[in-house]
Amino acid sequence: MSSIANANGVPSEFIVQLEDVHKSFIMGKEAVPALRGVTLNVRRGEILCMMGPSGSGKTTLLNIIGGLDTPSRGHVIVDGENVVSLSEENLARLRLRKMGFVFQNFNLLSNFTALENVQVPMVLLGQRDPRRAKELLKLVGLGDRMTHYPSELSGGQQQRVAIARALANDPPLIIGDEMTGDLDTATSYEVMELIARLNREHGTTIVYVTHDPRMSKFAHRVIHMRDGRLAEEQFVDRATG
Ligand code: ADP
Ligand code: MG
């Protein structure tokens, strides 16, 4: 695909470009195929939802986009950078600058306060900014919980801290794997509404996985995976307002 071949350093309307991405995990002497040729472009400012049965490759795909795992073959371009060919150090910097991650189990550091957790990606980039961290916690509605530890927060509040942390270095892309998987329905809606607002107000691109069809309604596009392939694509008719 010429768009991929020319992508190095050239701004593209796509923040993520995947071409023929394969991934197999070696288990003993066997190769377990997780992705079997995924080609996918994600537009800047898009909210893309991935669905599909357990084991269909959703997490593997997110991890490859996020540089947390490498493909067995295929091309992965994120914001014009060829993720597969980056050195470990440059890949770490790309992740810290360009992507924020939100996981099902929040992954907060339990002995750090909310405010300290939000600053972790800043510290890793050598750019601590407590004022920005406070603003982000206010943005996610936790202005009055900054010095609380994760154990002192509800699941929904912990996920808000994780979202604030994902935004720490102002990345253009948020990657979410089952973000609302451990939350009750009302809290899930609150978290997804926050995500949708970040998209509307800041243009942040969102790529997220969910099992819950109700949570897929926040996306512009829903892709269903099956057996390591993209099986079906729907454009969501969002009644906004
Ligand atoms: P999903 O997120 O859709 O449930 P995954 O991407 O986690 O699916 O897994 C896809 C396939 O890859 C499954 O068969 C799974 O068992 C396998 N797999 C995922 N991660 C690993 C791993 N680290 N080692 C071995 N097999 C794995
Ligand atoms: Mg998964």
Image (cartoon, grey):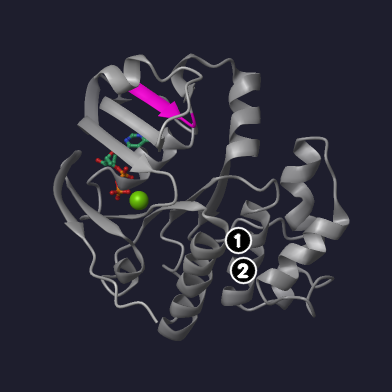
Q: Nearer the viewer, residue 94 or 149?
A: 94
Query: Magenta segment range?
Result: 72-79
- Residue at point 18% right, 57% down? 234
User: Is 234 positioned to the left or the right of 11 in the image?
Assistant: left
User: Is 232 positioned to the left or the right of 107 in the image?
Assistant: left
Q: Are marks 2 and 1 in contact (CB under 8 Å)?
A: yes
Viewer can see residue 121: yes
Residue at label 2?
Answer: 160
Q: Nearer the viewer, residue 26 or 129?
A: 129
Q: Secondary structure at mark 1?
A: helix
Q: Nearer the viewer, residue 45 or 163?
A: 45
Q: Position of residue 212 (x, y in %)?
A: 30, 70
Determine whether the beta carbon of the residue marked 1 sits less than 8 angstroms from the nearest atom of ligand 2.
no
For the image, the number of numbered tags is 2
Specify whether residue 78 is painted magenta. Answer: yes
User: Is 146 positioned to the left or the right of 212 in the image?
Assistant: right
Specify whether residue 47 is painted magenta. Answer: no
Specify the quadrant of the image occupied by residue 146. bottom right
Residue at label 1?
Answer: 163
Q: How many angstroms separate mark 2 from mark 1 (CA)?
A: 5 Å
Quadrant containing the N terminus in the rendered view: top left
Numbered mark located on residue 113 in the image: none
